Amino acid sequence: GAFHRWGPGHRLWGTESGLPRASRNRRPWTRAMQQASGKVELKPWSKTVESWNAGGSDYFVMHMSDGSDTILRPTAQVSLEDLNMLAGTDACLTGAFVEPKPYTPLSPMEQYPVDYDGGPIARGGGFEVFGLSCDG
């Protein structure tokens, strides 16, 4: 059968930004080092906007104390294996919130969630983790 992009019924899940409430971060996007604390969860890939933003494979989310969720992004300093050790635990991490970047489809047959204008939703936002503690 033909491939179809995620249509209007899948794109926004009741939000204005194209990111589900759980993925939107109320903090300003910045490259300044910050601390994030909450419970770390390993989530499997799924056909959701949150999973799309995470990159299309299993990913880690931190359930923040303010009720929001933030995708955790590995770095050269903190690997996926390091994050996996924290899954299911409360943690305090050092890093930087990063803004999602526009996505350009690689093929006209590719599936992706769309924004109000019918273009692909940006991806790659979250919290880049540079340290596994909040100790100065």
Image: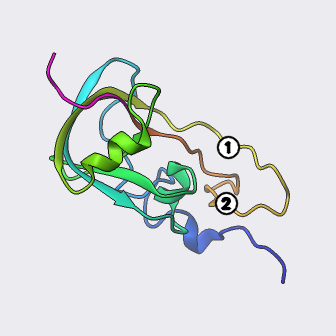
Q: Determine the residue positioned at 83% across, 63% down.
A: 109
Q: Residue 31, image x and y in percent?
A: 41, 20
- Quadrant housing the C terminus: top left
Which region shows up in magenta? Answer: 129-136
The amino acid sitting under disc 1 is Tyr
Q: Identify the mark nearer the N-term, 2 or 1.
A: 1
Q: Residue 125, image x and y in percent?
A: 47, 40
Q: Kindly indicate whether the residue at mark 1 contacts the one at mark 2 (C-beta within 8 angstroms).
A: yes
Up/down of 34 relative to 111, above or below: above
Magenta residue check for 7: no
The amino acid sitting under disc 2 is Tyr
Up/down of 23 relative to 6, above or below: above
Magenta residue check for 130: yes
Q: Residue 134, image x and y in percent?
A: 17, 26
- The residue closer to the viewer here, 1 or 28, is 1
User: What secondary structure is the magenta-colored segment mainly?
Assistant: loop
Q: Is residue 69 visible?
A: no
Dot 1, how many residues are within 10 Å of its Cα: few (below 14), some (14-19), or many (20+)? few
- The residue closer to the viewer here, 4 or 73, is 73
43 relative to 5 in the view: left or right:
left
Dot 2, how many residues are within 10 Å of its Cα: few (below 14), some (14-19), or many (20+)? many
Q: Determine the residue positioned at 26% across, 24% down.
A: 34
Residue 131 occupies quadrant: top left
Q: How far is the residue under mark 2 from the one under mark 1?
A: 10 Å
* Residue position marked by numbered label 1 in the rendering: 103
Disc 2 on helix, strand or loop?
A: loop
Q: Determine the residue positioned at 38% across, 32% down.
A: 78
Residue 82 is marked as: none
Q: Is residue 116 visible?
A: yes
* Residue position marked by numbered label 2 in the rendering: 112
115 relative to 16 in the view: left or right:
right
